[in-house]
Amino acid sequence: MKNILIIISFVILLPLATNAAGKTKMPDVRKYKTELNLTEDQMNRLNTVYNNFDARAKLQAPAQTGRERMEQRMQLRKEMRKEIAQVLTKEQRQAYIQIMQNNQQRKQQKQQ
């Protein structure tokens, strides 16, 4: 039964891994399962948060300028981070913040 749920989750999440333009890759929740020691319930809730983010991004009114589009995405990400924080325990939130900071540092190093 667990294997079936895992396969179904994978099939559902695979197409949602990118936005309509194919540019934004959503985080792999399975990676966080081990790094943050997530429960199955937390995994399901995080999948819902990421799916909702993707759906809201696609449903937004098209931005007139690149700056507006950037501001819209920043606002959606801010809302998503709040929702993620509600799913995680205090210790998991601290670990998640550290993971995000490490990811940001890696991105900056690649750009240099």
Image (cartoon, grey):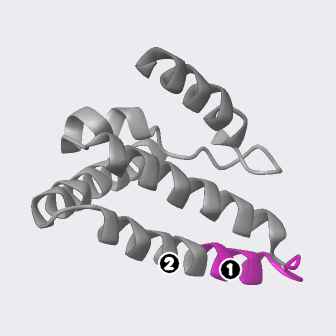
Tag 2 residue: 79
Q: Nearer the viewer, mark 2 or mark 1?
A: 2
Q: Amino acid at mark 1?
A: Gln
Residue 48 lies left or right of residue 34; in this view the side is right
- Could you tell me which residue is drawn at 21 percent across and 38 percent down? 35
Q: Amino acid at mark 2?
A: Glu
Q: Is residue 54 above or below residue 77?
A: above
**Residue 111: x, y in percent?**
48, 48
Q: Nearer the viewer, residue 92 or 77?
A: 92
Q: Is residue 68 above or below residue 106?
A: below
The quarter of the picture where residue 82 lies is bottom left
Q: Is residue 112 visible?
A: no
Residue at the left extreme of this rendering: 91
Which numbered circle lies on residue 41?
none
Residue 92 lies left or right of residue 6; in this view the side is left
In the rendered structure, which segment of residues is drawn in magenta?
61-73
- Could you tell me which residue is drawn at 49 percent across and 70 percent down? 80
- Could you tell me which residue is drawn at 31 percent across and 69 percent down? 85
Magenta segment, prevailing SS (helix, strand or loop): helix
Q: Is residue 67 above or below residue 26?
A: below
Helix, strand or loop under label 1: helix
Q: Is residue 66 above or below residue 52?
A: below
Residue 23 lies left or right of residue 38; in this view the side is right
Which numbered circle lies on residue 72?
1
**Residue 76: x, y in percent?**
59, 75
Inter-mark Cα distance, 2 to 1? 11 Å
Helix, strand or loop under label 2: helix
Residue 77 lies in the magenta stretch: no
**Residue 8: x, y in percent?**
60, 26
Mark 2 neighbour density, 10 Å: few (under 14) some (14–19) many (20 or more)? some
